[in-house]
Image: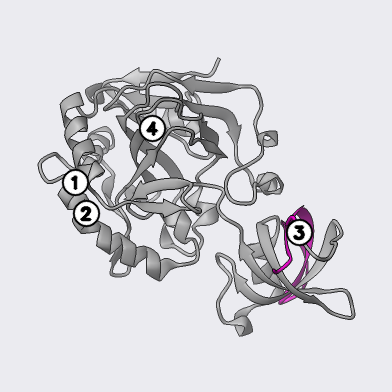
Amino acid sequence: MWTSQSIKTENISQKDLENILSGKIAALVVTNFYSNIQCTEIIKKIETSKKMYFQKSKLEHIGPFLMSFATRKKDYFEKSKEFQQISQNIFEKIENPSTRIFNMIQKILPSFSICLAEEEEDHFSPFVIRIHRKGKSIPIHKDNVKYEGKEYTISKIDQQLSCVLHLQESEKGGDVIIYRNQWNKKDEKYRNIDFGYMSNVVTKEYCKISNINKGDLVIINPNYYHQVTKILGETPRITLGMFLGIYTKNNKIVAWA
Amino acid sequence: MTDIIWGNGSEILSPNCFILNVTHRKNGNKQSYSDVEKIKIVQADIPGLPQNESEWNNEILGKCTHEAFLKCEIQSRDESGFILAKVSHSGVGGY
């Protein structure tokens, strides 16, 4: 059986990260990464922040994410710059999640440097906030910047991790499912037109994480197919996501969204 | 309305032509398209493919299109059966 592992921030070790990267475990759920009170404060700020929409309003978010700018690098970096002020406003009184995640990783991997990804003079977007309302779901997909981010320097990373902070859960639905199947290029024949993949790419071996609480940070290897089930409650599911790219030989980690 | 087909890039025929294994067709296409079509690129929006067409060659086109999922917005079909199309990456496989 393929399972996730719940853990407290102070107990995470290098071995835990290795277990995610190798697929030994499906996910690491870092419990209470932010407190309930902090999440509520962040949500209040999010509610009044300017939203953006992806794929004809199917997906609502704050802040740009690289995959929607696969061949529009200039636009991506402009939007990332615009987002700086918005993110500073949201995290005016609460520790920025980039800082908190970087500090956590730095303690686990002290020989690695970690910073926001840069390309020439431009900074990548540090994270993206996604708002999924009732009826929305995220189809089966993978995230692999080495394949889809070819226009960007971060496509040269060796390994990729996904970090998703759960700020608000819906009453029902919105469960994360991670399949024990990694993407490979041959799967491109099973692509859906707009987004994600047909179910042919996955088998029946999967891990469903349905006990994620507000404030938990979920870390996965995003090259394993994953999806989010339909949101069934009235309360929107709100998450904050970023990727970490690992340059193994250079002992360097960069973050982006 | 422009006819659109989607599919995966296969064999490279020249620096701007390749075979597409067609997997999807737009509902309402005016013409019919077979499961394998020869595509001549008239405009491109493909990750990794230089904007300047003079920099294209078989190897670069192969790296960017082989097995990749591509969208072809069709302009016309020439006398030799090639489809002239704007070729782009189609949406994203990730988020």
What residue sits right under mark 1 in the picture? Answer: A90
Depth check, mark 3 against mark 2: the one in front is 3
What mark, if any, has residue A219 been given in the picture?
4
**Magenta highlight range:** B1-27
Depth check, mark 4 against mark 2: the one in front is 2
Name the chain letter of the residue that bears numbered label 3.
B
What mark, if any, has residue A86 been given in the picture?
2
The numbered mark, 4 or 2, whose residue comes first in the sequence reads 2
Left or right: residue B49 compared with residue A34: right
Measured as percent of width and height from the top left, residue B60 is found at 64, 70
> Is the residue at mark 3 from the same chain as the one at mark 2?
no
Q: Can residue A26 be seen in this view?
A: yes
- Which residue is more in the foreground, B74 or A25? B74
Question: Rounded to the nearest whole Å, what is the CA distance between mark 1 and mark 3?
Answer: 45 Å
Is B18 part of what is drawn in magenta?
yes
Amino acid at dot 2: Ile
Amino acid at dot 1: Ile
Number of labels in the image equals 4
What mark, if any, has residue A76 been given in the picture?
none
